[in-house]
């Protein structure tokens, strides 16, 4: 059974600082997604990572995937308040077509001045 | 461009009542799914569909029914509501091909008293 873990679950960081959120998963996969959820809102897609060594960047966020370690990271550079949100990783099992994507528990990020 | 539309946004039910949560998408996506979101547990998959006429169970299917008579619509039925079904429900759709990101509806906040 695929399990997805994230750490930390809660993160309070100062503006301007750097930090990394980790996503570990328990079974072979090379398809991993990162989503953002603002309080009381829906989820929106941030990154889609589809191969070992994949790296995607958007603004102050950079995501990477190491399929051998079954690990993805979401790195935050010089945090700003607008990045305060909950971040979810989601893993798709290795199949030929989309199947039961499993979400991690989420990391609640608070960026404080 | 509506994307994924869920109704209602809020609902209060009494224990034992039934109701249907509606979900419609206008992106011609093959794959649709229902998740519930509970604090600290991320999103858990209830049911999903890989095309019209085809549905399958996710992680937490008990107490819920679905059907998919058209590509656009994927309603979720609560047969006899229980307090344990108090949650936020999200409908999502994607192209159904491996590695395709999901698009989420705005969510339904359901309270069962």
Image (cartoon, rainbow, N blue to C red):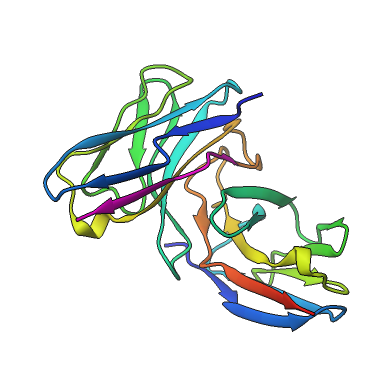
Residue at (56, 48) in percent of width and height: A42
Quadrant housing the C terminus of chain B:
bottom left
**Does the rendering let one see residue A112?**
yes
Does residue B63 lie above or below A91 as drawn? above
Quick check: A54 left or right of A105? right
Residue A60 higher or lower than A45, as above or below:
below
Q: Nearer the viewer, residue B55 or B102?
A: B102
Find residue B7 and report its image quarter: top left
Residue B55 sits above or below residue B73 on the image: below
Is A91 magenta? The answer is no
Q: Position of residue A51 (x, y in %)?
A: 75, 54
Q: Is residue A86 left or right of residue B92?
A: right
**Region in magenta:** B103-113
Q: Position of residue A33 (x, y in %)?
A: 66, 54
Q: Quadrant of residue B51?
A: top left
Identified at 42% across, 20% down, the residue is B52
Tell me the quarter of the picture where residue B67 sits. top left
With A19 as the anchor, is B70 left or right in this view?
left
The answer to whether B17 appears left or right of A43 in the picture is: left
The answer to whether residue A35 is above or below residue B97 is: below
Residue drawn at 82 percent across, 63 percent down = A61
Magenta stretch: includes residue B111: yes
Q: Nearer the viewer, residue B66 or A82?
A: A82
Residue extending farthest top? B70
Q: Quadrant of the N terminus of chain B?
A: top right
């Amino acid at each position: 059974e695929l399990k997805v873990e994230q750490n930390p679950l809660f993160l309070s960081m100062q503006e301007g600082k750097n930090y990394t959120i980790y996503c570990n998963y328990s079974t072979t996969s090379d398809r991993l997604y990162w989503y953002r959820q603002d309080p009381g809102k829906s989820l929106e897609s941030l990154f889609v990572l589809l191969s070992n060594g994949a790296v995607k960047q958007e603004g102050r966020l950079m995501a990477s995937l190491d399929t051998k370690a079954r690990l993805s990271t979401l790195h935050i550079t010089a945090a700003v308040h607008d990045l305060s949100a909950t971040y979810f990783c989601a893993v798709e099992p290795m199949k030929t077509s989309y199947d039961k994507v499993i979400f991690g528990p989420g990391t609640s990020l608070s960026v404080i001045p | 461009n509506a994307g994924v539309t869920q109704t209602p946004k809020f609902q209060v039910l009494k224990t034992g009542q039934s109701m249907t949560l509606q979900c419609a998408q206008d992106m011609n996506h093959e794959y649709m799914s229902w998740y519930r979101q509970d604090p600290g547990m991320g999103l858990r998959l209830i049911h999903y569909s890989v095309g019209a006429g085809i549905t399958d169970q996710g992680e937490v299917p008990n107490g819920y029914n679905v059907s998919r008579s058209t590509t656009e619509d994927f309603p979720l039925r609560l047969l006899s509501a229980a307090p344990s079904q108090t949650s936020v429900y999200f409908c999502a759709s994607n192209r159904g091909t491996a590695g395709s990101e999901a698009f989420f509806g705005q969510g339904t906040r359901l309270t069962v008293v």
